[in-house]
Amino acid sequence: MKRYGMSLCALASFVALTLPCVAQDSAKSNPWNGSWKVDRSTLKYDGPSVSVATDADGYTVTRGGTASPKVTCDGKPNAAVNGTVTTCTKDGTGYALENTRDGKTVSKTKVETSADGKTLTRTLNVIPPEGDPYTITMLSKKVSGGDGAPTVWKETGFTESQDTGILTVQVNGDSVDFKETDNDKPLTCKLDGTPTKFGRGTISVKQVGPRTLKVTYSQDGKVGRENTFVLSPNGKTVKETDITPAPSPSTMSVMFHKS
């Protein structure tokens, strides 16, 4: 499942046997191959918190004690941040933003606050460099602030437009083909920890035990997320645990059942 973190890329998940076993097992006998269905009732999510200070011109977001450059919402492009140019306009109870890179639109976001001021909804329409556009909707609850003081929001949940809930895995010797619940086509990755280009960053895989696989997503030399997959002793379920580091720390866990 995608999570909006260090990039706007899909976050793939997959599982594999220990390398010696993978090399020896045939595709039919490999217990990891096939389809895995997510059990949404098991989803646990502890999202990041941010502080947002608003004024007549726009807003400033602070994560982990570090403030990002102020976003001015006058319909004109703001100065580029890490290669991304944001254009923001005020829209009802929130804002409408367009993000571009190299002159191309990569995403459009609508930010809305509920009438009682307790809920923040961010609807992110992503236009990836490859594949079809998709939408991520993120919900946050108000923790503190308001009445002129910066408001602290904590992310409590998210939904994804293209998430089918089905993960498919196919181990082939020293590599694996997999299709995540929200990917439009399978991705092939080596099982020896070699970084593989993925979106605007890389993904690397490392076997850390007979039933445990760690997947690391990085961009510009920085770790964006680490996903750990653990196979149950009976081979019928896989538990996925995701950890995103500061400045927007979050954790997520969910179970998959063999289908």
Image: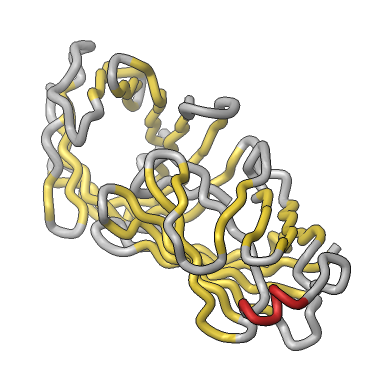
From the top left corner, tell me how far across and down residue 103 is, in percent: 29, 14
Residue 74 in view here: yes
From the top left corner, tell me how far across and down residue 203 is, in percent: 45, 55
Residue 58 location, quadrant = top left
Rendered view: 148 above or below 245: above
Residue plotted at (57% across, 55% down): 189
From the top left corner, tell me how far across and down residue 186 is, in percent: 67, 45
Tell which of 139 and 86 is nearer to you.
86
**From the viewer's perspective, is 189 left or right of 26?**
left
**From the viewer's perspective, is 103 left or right of 126?**
left
Residue plotted at (81% across, 60% down): 34
* Number of numbered discs visible in the structure rendering: 0
**From the viewer's perspective, is 64 left or right of 243?**
left
Rendered view: 42 above or below 132: below
Residue 125 in view here: no
Tell which of 13 and 244 is nearer to you.
13
Residue plotted at (40% across, 27% down): 109
